[in-house]
Image (cartoon, grey):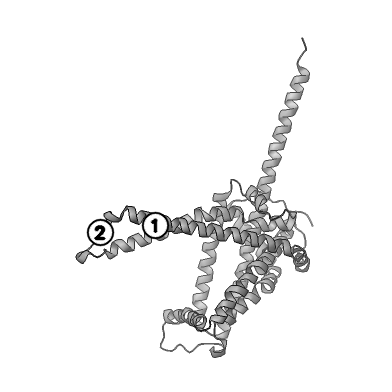
Amino acid sequence: MNQTPLAPMGVGKLLDRSFSVYRQHFSAFFLMALIWFGPFLLLQQFMMVDIGSMPFLLQDSEGSDFWEVLGNRFIGQEEMLTDNIGLLLAYLFLVIPLLTLVGYPQLLSVATLLTQASIKGEPLRLKDAMKQALGRFWPLVGSTVVYGLIAIGIMLGFFLVCVMLFFLLAFTLGGSFDAFKGIGNEANPIFMVLMFIFSYFVFIIGSILVPGYFLLRWGFYMPVVLFEGDGIGIAKSWSLTKGNFWRLIGLFLVVSLLYSIFSGGVQALVTGTMGMSMVAQLLLILLGCLLVPWMSIVYALAYFDLVVRKEGTDLQFMLSKQATEESVTSNELGTPHE
């Protein structure tokens, strides 16, 4: 088949192409998600929800409104975890590490290989893509461990700095709070709420701009390890994302917003209408397996877009340098000697 050239894409065009790739090769991507993501979701549901006391099709919610049924889902999960500490520990120290070190790296690697075949116009073979991704299993695991440790260190450091700044600010402005105290020398609740909202937004924005900057710049290590076998891949990812942070952060904020709206809406609809039933839980698992491939395709296309931009810049630099050298050489040859 003919190779389809990949030109640099903006956020809108990249999202449009992700939908196109997913639509054209839906079965391969969905089966990939069922293999690498579905079992973890199923295990999570078994550990966080009491399957034994759950109805099969519809939960009897007579006399309860929509929001009450929806709230019971989260209350039930919380009670299940708090009543069984063993399940909680198994989930934290077994399921999450396996999903982080095995599930996600293999899922993203297979999705990247399938996306590469799609944009090149080559036939998509899920079996071959999975075999190639498994061939890089341990390098991907090792790179993910290093990336995870770096991420934990950055987040802890950022959190400690925020705590120190908060106490420093509170100590510095302590005397200024007297003006906001109400009757009985108690803090004004309106002022406290406004301070909490302001601090929350500052923390969120700071998390995106500070830890998010480094984690996003290093976040394309997986395709580098998959294709190039370049050690951990973090250094190459940093080089690829140079000058593209704001475009990438805009892309992933849009993707996260779309995912949250669609996923949250469907979850609320399913839970509100069917309650905590087995069929509802299976539908939510299928929903996760439907959405994760699309996000993986966006990640893969973002990587290939970075490669095209980087190679195009490098090629332009090489051609410019070569033209300059040829011009200098011709000038030297054309200059008469005295």
Q: Are marks 2 and 1 in contact (CB under 8 Å)?
A: no
Task: Assess disc 2: are there few (<14), some (14-19) or many (≥20) residues with their C-alpha within 10 Å of its C-alpha.
Answer: some
Q: How many marks?
A: 2
Instruction: Kindly identify the amino acid type of the residue bearing the numbered disc 1.
Output: Phe
Per the model, the C-alpha gap separating discs 2 and 1 is 18 Å
Residue lying at the far left in this picture: please name it.
Answer: 183
First in sequence: mark 2 vs mark 1: 1
184 up-or-down from 224: above or below: below
Secondary structure of the residue carrying numbered label 2: helix
Whole-percent x, y for residue 169 in the image: 36, 54
Q: Nearer the viewer, residue 235 or 53?
A: 235
* Picture disc at residue 166: 1
Secondary structure of the residue carrying numbered label 1: helix
| Occupied quadrant, residue 151 | bottom right
Residue at 52 percent across and 67 percent down: it is 260
Q: Is residue 121 left or right of residue 221?
A: right
Choose mark 2 or mark 1, whichever is in front. Answer: 1
33 up-or-down from 21: above or below: below
Q: Which quarter of the figure is the C terminus placed in?
A: top right
Residue under label 2 = 180
Residue at 29 percent across and 63 percent down: it is 190
Instruction: Kindly identify the amino acid type of the residue bearing the numbered disc 2.
Output: Phe
| Occupied quadrant, residue 202 | bottom left
Residue at 20 percent across and 65 percent down: it is 183
Whole-percent x, y for residue 253 in the image: 53, 58
Q: Is residue 324 left or right of residue 162?
A: right
